Every structure is written in structure tokens, then in C-alpha cells.
Image: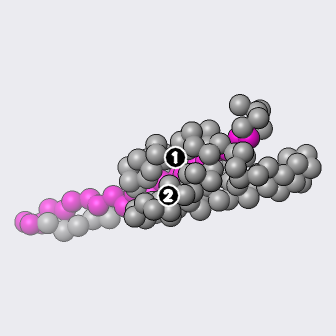
Amino acid sequence: MTSFHSRHKNARISAQKVRPLADLVRGMYADEALDALKYQPQRGARMLEKVIKSAVGNAQQPEQNSGRSHRIEELVLTEVCVDGGPMFKRIRPRARGSAFTIKKRSSHIRVALTPIDEL
């Protein structure tokens, strides 16, 4: 089974904010997923859109898949995964000499497309 992958590592957004969008588009055709994400107001939707477009570009390169180019209408999002990435840790001063830690979270966004005839 051939699948075409794309990933965005160390995306400066919390994985918790992107996961609902990943759940929204998982299992859709690639063109439907891009249409659905276009109307979502979240910043994570723009990041997920770019990763899907990159995977579609990988599928449309004939040299990567033995001389055959796949159309966007026949590609299905089989894997949309958002994992936590590294955190920047900062310190926020608080009352009476104490401090709170601030975790600036990042995430890894991973997408896999599979042609419909290979499912």
C-alpha cells in the first residue's frame, strides 16, 4: 500500500488546539479536507492546510511513485496525527519571591495520503 507523507515538526502551537481539526478531516478526501479547513477560523487550520498541500504535492510528483501522478480527487487522508513536541520553559515571577513556570508548547503535525484504489 502506497501512502504519501508530509509533516510539520516543531509547529509553534499546542497539540491540543490542532487535534480537533485533525479529527474533523481524518478519513476525508484531500480536496474536501482542504475545503473544510479553508472556512475554519483557527490558526491551526492554516498549519494543517499547508501540511496537507505538501502531501498532495508529494503524491503528484511522478518520479516519487513509479511514473504515476495521482489526482487530488482520488487521495484520502488515512492518517492525521498531532503529537506534542518540545516545550520552551520560561519563569514568571509571582508574589513573595515565588515563581510559576510557563510552558510554551509545540507540536508535530503528520499527514498520510493514500490513493482510493489502494484502500
Q: If you read the primary sequence from the N terminus, does the residue marked by circle 2 or circle 1 appear first?
A: 1
Label of residue 77 in the image? none
Horizontal relation, residue 61 to residue 79: left or right: right
Q: Position of residue 66 (x, y in %)?
A: 91, 46
Say which quarter of the image contains residue 115.
top right
Say which quarter of the image contains residue 62.
bottom right
Label pair 2/1, CB-CB below 8 angstroms:
yes
Q: Position of residue 23 (x, y in %)?
A: 46, 43
Residue sitting nearer the eye, 53 or 15:
53
Point out the image quarter for the C terminus.
top right
Q: Position of residue 44 (x, y in %)?
A: 45, 60
> What is the three-letter code of the residue carrying label 1?
Val
> What is the three-letter code of the residue carrying label 2?
Leu
Point out the image quarter for the N terminus.
top right
Most common secondary structure along the magenta stretch: strand
**At x 38% / y 49%, what residue is drawn?**
16
Magenta residue span = 95-115
Q: Circle 2 is placed at which residue position?
A: 37
Q: Is residue 115 visible?
A: yes
Horizontal relation, residue 5 to residue 109: left or right: right
Colour mapping used in the image: one colour
Horizontal relation, residue 18 to residue 102: left or right: right
Decide: is 31 above or below 26. below
**At x 69% / y 45%, what residue is drawn?**
75
**At x 53% / y 42%, what residue is drawn?**
26
Say which quarter of the image contains residue 29.
top right
Q: What is the secondary structure assignment of the residue under circle 2?
A: helix
**At x 58% / y 51%, what residue is drawn?**
32
Q: Is residue 35 magenta?
A: no
Residue sitting nearer the eye, 69 or 99:
69
Q: Circle 1 is placed at which residue position?
A: 25
